[in-house]
Image (tube, helix red, strand yellow):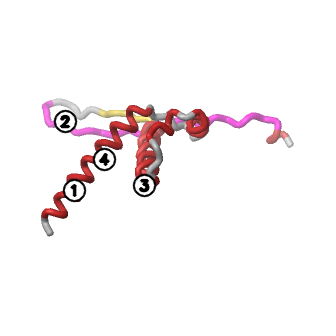
Amino acid sequence: MSQLLTPKRKKKENPATVATISLNEGQPKTVTLGLSLIRSNIVTRLLLRMIILHGFPLPMVDHVAFKVFSRNLQPYELVAYRTIKETCMKIYIKEKKRVSHALSNL
């Protein structure tokens, strides 16, 4: 019964350490990234994929219901409409070039 009365503990963020090798003289530098940042990038890519594959309108990320939904995807930080639009356009241009190149080789 005591488990029901105690609040949930927040999970501690475990940082992931990535070592980079320096080509210059000296010691290699170490960069620490939070796992939530890495997870956030994965979730953003999945969101972009969902928008593109299903043809959802880009302004959906500014809709109140979507913002409420995103806030509950912890520890995901909501991406702005402008970022979604710019990234979708980059993906579109890249895929357009890939398809154009494939068609020119036929």
The label nearer to you, 2 versus 4, is 4
Q: Is residue 49 above or below residue 69?
A: below
The label nearer to you, 3 versus 2, is 3
Q: Which residue is mark 3?
A: 53
| Residue lying furthest bottom | 106
Predominant SS along the magenta part:
loop
- The quarter of the picture where the C terminus appears is bottom left
How far across and down, in percent of the image, does residue 69 sit? 60, 40
Q: Amino acid at mark 1?
A: Arg
The label nearer to you, 2 versus 1, is 1
Question: Which of disc 2 and disc 3 is earlier in sequence?
Answer: 2
How far across and down, in percent of the image, does residue 78 sit? 50, 34
Splitting the image into 4 quarters, where does residue 33 fall? top left
Q: Classify mark 2: residues with Cα within 10 Å, few (<14), some (14-19) or many (20+).
A: few
Residues shaded magenta? 5-25
- The quarter of the picture where the N terminus appears is top right
Question: Which of disc 1 and disc 3 is earlier in sequence?
Answer: 3
Residue depicted at x 25% and y 49%: 94
Q: Which residue is mark 4?
A: 91
Question: Which of disc 4 and disc 1 is earlier in sequence?
Answer: 4
Q: Amino acid at mark 2?
A: Ser
In the image, 72 versus 86, the foreground residue is 86
Q: At numbered mark 4, what does the secondary structure look like: helix, strand or loop? A: helix
Q: Amino acid at mark 3?
A: Leu
Question: Which of disc 1 and disc 2 is earlier in sequence?
Answer: 2
Q: Classify mark 3: residues with Cα within 10 Å, few (<14), some (14-19) or many (20+).
A: few
Q: Which residue is mark 1?
A: 98
